[in-house]
Amino acid sequence: MKTINKIYTVLILFMLYAPILVLMLFSFNSTSNTGVFTGFSFYWYRELFRSAAAFAALKNTLVLAISSAVLSTLIGTMAAIGLRKMRNKYVKGLITSVTNIPMMNPDIVTGISMMLLFVFVGTMLGQQDKLNFWTLLIAHTTFNIPYVYLNVSPKFQQMDKHLPEAALDLGCTPLQAFFKVELPCIFSGIVTGFIIAFTMSLDDFVISYFCSGSDFQTLPILIYSMTKKEVTPDIYALSTLMIVAILTLLILSNLSGSKEERAKIRALRKKRAAARKEAKA
Amino acid sequence: MKKRTLLERMASAPHLVWMVLFIVAPLLFVAYYAFTTPDGSFTFENIAALSNHAETFLFSVCMALISTVICLLIGYPLAYCISRASARAQKILIMLIMLPMWMNLLIRTYSMMAILDDGGFLNNLLMRLGFAPVHIVGTAGAVIFGMVYNFLPYMVLPIHSVISKLDWRLIEAANDLGCNNFRVLTRVILPLSVPGIISGLTMVFVPSISTFYISQKLGGGTFELIGDTIERQFQNPVTYHVGASISLVMMILILISLAIMNRFSDSETGGMIA
């Protein structure tokens, strides 16, 4: 990399990370001042851990993310399985485009469209709380399905089409052929889809904002209502904890992913060292 | 290929039902609300009321366009720089670009506000160094800055994925045939990265035009984007109908421009490869 390229890259990365670093710094401020660092303390963390609302929101967020990821992975994978042999290109194209609508549309439109549906149906059924956990679950599952579908269905295209046929010829029933041959081929796509769905759900604010009621708040919604009021560093403390959690997750997933790679590199190094020793001898 | 069995047809059924109930039906509800009054009778009034918001709409389009162009101007060189690094460094750099995306938009915007605010970190720093404080939060520039800051990764990632897969023999060939570096960039690299640019443009433009949090925080409540207008209409059931009509128009315009962009990028790459 040329020096000028390096300088430019570092400069932009600095711009991207500066606000996050400042935020982390001020989460340890001893006063509620967010402009001047007056002294180091854990005050805002203690304040945060005392707040029942934050813990309830954290629990809600995780419950929602896991259940919507499971549901969307199930529906999206089944859709990919069901549609993989569809011959009619136009119908398939239509289904794919409609599936992708929540991904193309601005979040705010997806959010309000679902809210209108929920409010309308809720009013028809005479419900008091028209927006609750179930409406959030439906909304999150809906915007997650395209991510699962888009990760699973290409796996079928990459798979050797003769594999399931071979399994059938060797005496598998169609169901056995699916579970023993096809499922392992698409499994990595299912896992990726699940992880993306989970993180999309954790992170979503706009759609949740329109589809959630007062009795089920998620973390982004809580942060939104906190930032509407006076600026206090307890949000910084919460954000810092979330950033650290995400970082840990990412590092862990990267470590497990590159284990094989590193094992290979280590083997290579050993070989080289051995070769060097031999050469010396 | 064998015919689809009944079981396979059944497998896609939940998705089809879900799609009709929760993707198609909600959009029909938006259209229904856009063309009705609160008591349920048909009307064009909500659509006519759009003229009150025409100025906001144009303003939002301008803001979104400006921040998209800035993202392209900053993001393209960055994607290019990253793609010239070693494979290992590229992996780490892409990770670093993606990492802020994993942090909630609210947190990123909020920390931005805390830094740029009148009594914030930046102004305190400036005053300590003996400079005059600058008023940033509450200006259009701050909102554009917030959009660029939040959505830059969406521009860098697709462009990088296209440039990093470029066949570098083409560039060598261009060099051999007498192109200088600038001509290589304009005649070879840029045209070949059009698909990445197009998807970057749409990925930045769509969230920029529909945002309401960034303008609320960094705009300091001094001006309104179309996202704010929509959000405000949905605070009160009476104005749902106007909100629905604004959303409907915005959605149709965005989907049309996406379709045009996609066609443009398809024909471009098609022509390029042929």
Image: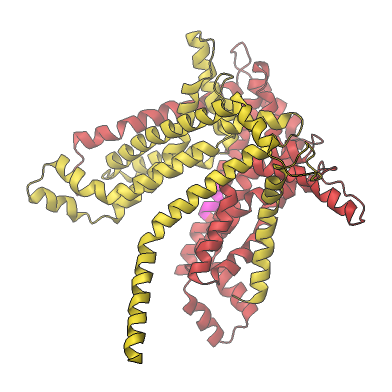
Q: Which residue is at 53% across, 67% downward?
A: B89
Q: Which chain is red?
A: B
Is residue A211 on the magenta stretch?
no
Residue A53, quarter of the rendered image: top right
Q: Is A233 located above or below residue B81 in the figure?
A: above
Observer able to see residue B62: no
| B220 vs A37, nearest the viewer | A37
| B205 vs A23, nearest the viewer | A23
Q: Position of residue B104 (x, y in %)?
A: 60, 41
Residue A276, quarter of the rendered image: bottom left
Q: Considering the image in quadrants, where does the N terminus of chain A appear?
A: bottom right
Q: Which residue is at 68% across, 24% downward?
A: B233
User: Left or right of A177: which side holds A8?
Assistant: right
Residues shaded magenta: B258-263
User: Left or right of A27: which side holds B167?
Assistant: left
Observer able to see residue A200: yes
Chain A colour in the picture: yellow
Render colour scheme: by chain
Magenta-colored segment: predominant secondary structure: helix
Q: Position of residue B150 (x, y in %)?
A: 65, 48
Question: Which residue is at the far top?
Answer: A126
| A180 vs B189, nearest the viewer | A180
Q: Considering the image in quadrants, where does the C terminus of chain A appear?
A: bottom left
| A102 vs A243, nearest the viewer | A243
Q: Position of residue B243 (x, y in %)?
A: 65, 26
Q: Position of residue A115 (x, y in %)?
A: 55, 24
- Marks counted in the figure total 0
